[in-house]
C-alpha cells in the first residue's frame, strides 16, 4: 500500500513541476512521496538478505534514471535514487560504528549529500535515521521539518509529516512479484513518459 501511495504522489508532484508549476497543491501532495521511499529504504536495509545486491539494484536504477531526469528537469543534479543509495551506504556505516569517537567524522561524511548536490541533501539521511530507529517518528519528523523550514525555508515540506502518521498507525502490505518490479522501475519509466509528452 505504501509503495502505491509513494508512486502516485511522486507522479503528481512531477506532473505539477512540468505542467502546472504555479499550482502549489501538486508540490504539497508530492511531499508525501520521499518519506515513504525513505521508510522503504530502512525496511529494505533491515530485512535484505544481500546488502551488496541491494546497493547494486539502487545504483543501476539511479544510472538509468539520470538521463531522463536531466532531460525532463533540465538540471545536472543527481536524481533521488542516488540520494537513497548514499543514505543506504551511510546507514550501513552508522550501524557499524562501535566507538562513539567515530560519530564526529561520520557526521562530517554525511556532508557528501550536500557536496554531490543530492536531492534533499542532509535532510534525507536524517529522515532515514528517524525511520530506522522507529521511535516517536511523527514528533521527530515534525521537528526535522521545522528545523529545515528555518534553515532553507522549505514551507511545503511541513506537509511531509503525513506519511509518518500513516507509517505509525497503518499496517503496510508490501507489493510482490510483477507489481514489485513495476514499483522499482516506476521512477525512470514515469520520468521518460513525462519527457516524451513534453516534446
Image (cartoon, rainbow, N blue to C red):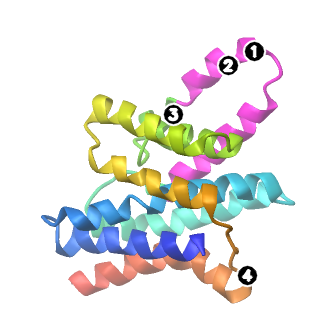
Q: CA distance from mark 3 to mark 2?
A: 15 Å
Residue farthest toward the top in the current orientation of the protein: 101
Q: CA distance from mark 4 to mark 3?
A: 33 Å
Residue beneath disc 1:
100
Residue beneath disc 3:
112
Q: Residue at x 45, y 36 (%)?
A: 144
Between 183 and 111, the one lying in front of the other is 183
Question: What span is colored magenta in the figure?
Answer: 81-110
**Depicted 164 relative to depicted 124: above or below:** below
CA neighbours of label 1 inside 10 A, class few (<14), some (14 to 19), many (20+): few
Sooner in the amino-acid sequence: mark 1 or mark 3: 1
Q: CA distance from mark 1 to mark 3?
A: 21 Å
Q: Position of residue 63 (x, y in %)?
A: 53, 63
Residue beneath disc 2:
103
Q: Position of residue 195 (x, y in %)?
A: 30, 78
Per the image, label 4 sits on a secondary structure element best described as loop
Q: Residue at x 68, y 52 (%)?
A: 42
Per the image, label 2 sits on a secondary structure element best described as helix
Sooner in the amino-acid sequence: mark 2 or mark 4: 2
CA neighbours of label 2 inside 10 A, class few (<14), some (14 to 19), many (20+): few
Per the image, label 3 sits on a secondary structure element best described as helix
Q: Is residue 194 magenta?
A: no
- Quadrant of the rendering where the N terminus is positioned: bottom right
Q: Residue at x 22, y 81 (%)?
A: 198
Residue beneath disc 4:
176
Q: CA distance from mark 2 to mark 4?
A: 37 Å
Between 129 and 61, the one lying in front of the other is 129
Query: Badges 1 and 2: C-beta atoms under 8 Å apart?
Result: yes
Amino acid at each position: 500500500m505504501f509503495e502505491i501511495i509513494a508512486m502516485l504522489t511522486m507522479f503528481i508532484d512531477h506532473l505539477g513541476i512540468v505542467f502546472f508549476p504555479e499550482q502549489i497543491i501538486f508540490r504539497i501532495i508530492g511531499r508525501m512521496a520521499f518519506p515513504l521511499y525513505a521508510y522503504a529504504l530502512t525496511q529494505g536495509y533491515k530485512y535484505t538478505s544481500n546488502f551488496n545486491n541491494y546497493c547494486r539494484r539502487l545504483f543501476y536504477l539511479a544510472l538509468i534514471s539520470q538521463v531522463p531526469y536531466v532531460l525532463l528537469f533540465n538540471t545536472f543534479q543527481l536524481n533521488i535514487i542516488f540520494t537513497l543509495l548514499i543514505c543506504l551506504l551511510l546507514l550501513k556505516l552508522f550501524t557499524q560504528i562501535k566507538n562513539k569517537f567515530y560519530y564526529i567524522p561520520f557526521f562530517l561524511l554525511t556532508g557528501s549529500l550536500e557536496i554531490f548536490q543530492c536531492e534533499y541533501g542532509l535532510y534525507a539521511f536524517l529522515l532515514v535515521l528517524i525511520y530506522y530507529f522507529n521511535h516517536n517518528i511523527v514528533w521527530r519528523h515534525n521537528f526535522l521539518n521545522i528545523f529545515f523550514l528555518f534553515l532553507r525555508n522549505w514551507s511545503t515540506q511541513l506537509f511531509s509529516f503525513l506519511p509518518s502518521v500513516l507509517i505509525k498507525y497503518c499496517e503496510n502490505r508490501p507489493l510482490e512479484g510483477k507489481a514489485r518490479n513495476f514499483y522499482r522501475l516506476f521512477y525512470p519509466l514515469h520520468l521518460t513518459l513525462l519527457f516524451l509528452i513534453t516534446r
